[in-house]
Image (spheres, rainbow, N blue to C red):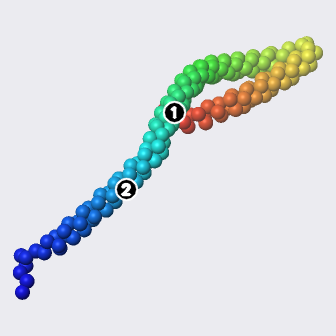
Amino acid sequence: MIDKNDHNPQNDQSEEGVDENSNRDKQDSMDRLSMAFETSARRWELIVYPSLFAFILLAAYGFYLIFSLAKDVHFLALSVDSNMNVMSSNLMTMTDSVGQLSANVRTMSVSVESMANDVRTLEPMLTSMDSMEASMKTMTHATYGIQRDMQSMNHNIHDASRPMTYWNSFMPW
């Protein structure tokens, strides 16, 4: 029988040779893998680092564009606000003026009624009534012209304020 502890020196040498060849093959394989990995890593570095730099540049430029747009919108909002204040004060003044005009027209109407009563009582002045009637027609036409002009002005103000209603939908107040 062969004892397990008996070693054949020839077997030891052949096993050592196989182990050395196996170690060399493993070492060569590891070296090739390491070289392939380094080459691949260099290729990735050539792609990833410039791409990352370009992304950072584009992100910074995008931030700049958004910031400048926000600043421009802020200035636009301030401009619209100041213009709306001016237009509001002008509309208030115009409202007061229309109120005064209406009061003056009422006063004229009362005066004309009073004059009509006085004219009826004075028979000799009937001849001049025809010319007064023509003057009243002229005043009526002028009042109608004023009414038409006020209607046109109201329409124009409404058209001018239409863009402001569009911008008001963007304003938070």
Q: Residue at x 34, y 54 (%)?
A: 31
Q: Residue at x 91, y 16 (%)?
A: 131
- Residue assigned mark 2: 32
- In the rendered structure, find residue 61 and report the number of the disc placed on it: 1
Quadrant assignment for the N terminus: bottom left
| SS type, badge 1 | helix
Q: Between marks 1 and 2, how big is the CA–CA gap?
A: 43 Å
| SS type, badge 2 | helix
Query: How far across and how far down the image is residue 170, in percent?
Result: 54, 36
- Decide which of 138, 71 is in the foreground and name it: 71
- Decide which of 146, 165 is in the foreground and name it: 165
Three-letter residue code for mark 1? Tyr
- Of badges 1 and 2, nearer the viewer stands 2
Q: Earlier in the sequence, mark 1 or mark 2?
A: 2
> Label 2: how many residues lie within 10 Å, few (<14), some (14-19) or many (20+)?
few
Look at the picture and state if 11 lies above or below 116.
Answer: below
